[in-house]
Amino acid sequence: MSLFDKFQPIVEIRAELQKLGIMPFGAVTEKILSSTEAIVNGHKVILAGTNNYLGLTFDPECIAAAKKAVEEQGTGTTGSRMANGTFTEHVKLEQELAAYFNRKHAIVFSTGYAATMGMSSTLTGAGDVIVLDADSHASIYDGVRLGGADVIRFRHNDAADLEKRLRRLGDRVTNTLIIVEGIYSMLGDQAPLADIAEVKRKYGGFLLVDEAHSLGMLGEHGRGVAEAAGVEDDVDFVVGTFSKSLGATGGYCVSSHPELEAIRFAIRSYIFTASPSPSVIASTRVALRLMQERPELRVRLWENAHRLYDGLKQLGFAVSPQVSPVVAVTIKQRDQAISWWNELMKRGAYVNLVMPPASPTTDSLLRCSVSAAHSSEQIDRIIEAFAALQAPADASAPTT
Amino acid sequence: MPDYNEFLTRIFAILKPFAKQGIILNEDSELVTELGLTSLQVMELIEQIEDHFDMSIPLNILPDIRTIHDLALQLEKLTN
């Protein structure tokens, strides 16, 4: 019995893939050409799985702001937000986030993972209850495990099942935090937030929504699923990331509960890590402004989402249940998914390969995400790459 | 409130389809190493028990469960 025995399944999968000459989880981007193109593992590809939803990573204004910040404030803060790592710009970004979300308070974190994990682990403790959607992100599961509260799952996107769980809690519901996501990262399906908010109104408790994959894409102002569903007042805490629509790294939590300012100093993932670098804060602040000034980015994003979704559906692939900027193709056989991922790369489309347990079921996924920066021609080339895949006689996908 | 034996009977009924040929389920049957349940199947088992007894089972009990006996015991504790 060795310390390393538990890693054997990973060792075996890696060896298997190496034998096939395919390394989907260690692909190296050798040269990034734009927000939508790169040279990866020697292939010139369209980036079709980057979560760069608004395509702002190469925006000239964002780049200029980041350059200026590096020159004026250096490459890093080298300190925690609680010690020497809070610069004026961190505070300004928090104020801007609070204003954008119409909330009173905001916290900026170093990563989206730190934000979600930190809030999930800190808001509740022993004796409290967390009721979370079964398909929640790993950062949520990691957080709730650390916090020590009783953790109860409800069936994915099933408000009726959530209601049952809250009913069973009785008086304990006052000490309960409900956690859901806006758009789910793997399949791109949306939470039925109007129904979830109604259940919360009926029974009580607090509601935290992770809008990591929905910021900038839903609602009149792009605030996410809560805004689109008209239930922002029912959401106690919104968490999210700067690493998708805003094209940088970092995370946030916004809330109108005044206690957030005290909670900030209890969140270990906020305290015991260095704060985001000045260049990251600078580009994020500009991206947050651009996202509000350019609603046309959102329009373009959804045009591309529909184009890719419809194209893959017409080809007979088993696509996600709902159109969204995340377009996932479900494939029953893991080996088929690996082989197709490799084929797509050779044909110039770099998508995400997702295998269990990262996928929500026992199936594998070829997960695409579109960007406002993709041209229609690039979307068509992604569809053509999928169309060229040859299914063996017994393949369970594409389906009709 | 259901007791240990009621939980046990229900768990046996739910797990029957998972038992490979020649394996007879008993209280000492190990859910993962013997029956080969995946993490998703363990969650399905939990959901079926929750529905049947109209109860919610916190994930926190899972690290203490290896066998069918462990599961029935933890469920009994939850309801007391």
Image (spheres, coloured by chain):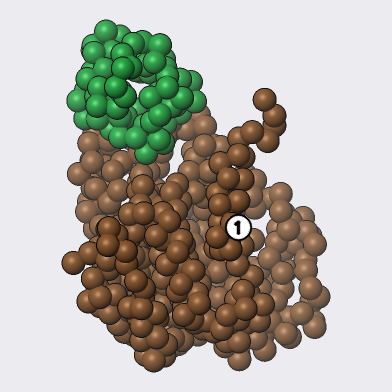
Chain colours: A brown, B green
Answer yes or no: is residue A172 visible. Answer: no
What residue is shown with label 1? A18
Which residue type does callout 1 highlight?
A: Gln
Residue A297 is situated, as x and y percent measured from the top left of the image, at 41, 86
Query: Above or below — where is B60 with respect to A286?
Result: above
Residue occupying image coordinates x 31% and y 24% = B20
Residue occupying image coordinates x 25% and y 75% = A315
Rendered image quadrant of residue A204: top left
Graded by Cα atoms within 10 Å as few (under 14), some (14 to 19) or many (20 or more), the crowding at tag 1 reads few
Query: Which element type, helix, strand or loop, lies under badge 1?
Result: helix
Query: Above or below — where is A350 with respect to A234?
Result: below
Left or right side of A255 for A182:
left
Residue A336 is situated, as x and y percent measured from the top left of the image, at 39, 60
Identify the subunit bearing mark 1: A
Residue A43 is situated, as x and y percent measured from the top left of the image, at 57, 80
Q: Nearer the viewer, residue B62 or A363?
A: A363
Q: Nearer the viewer, residue A320 or A365?
A: A365
Answer yes or no: is residue A334 visible. Answer: yes
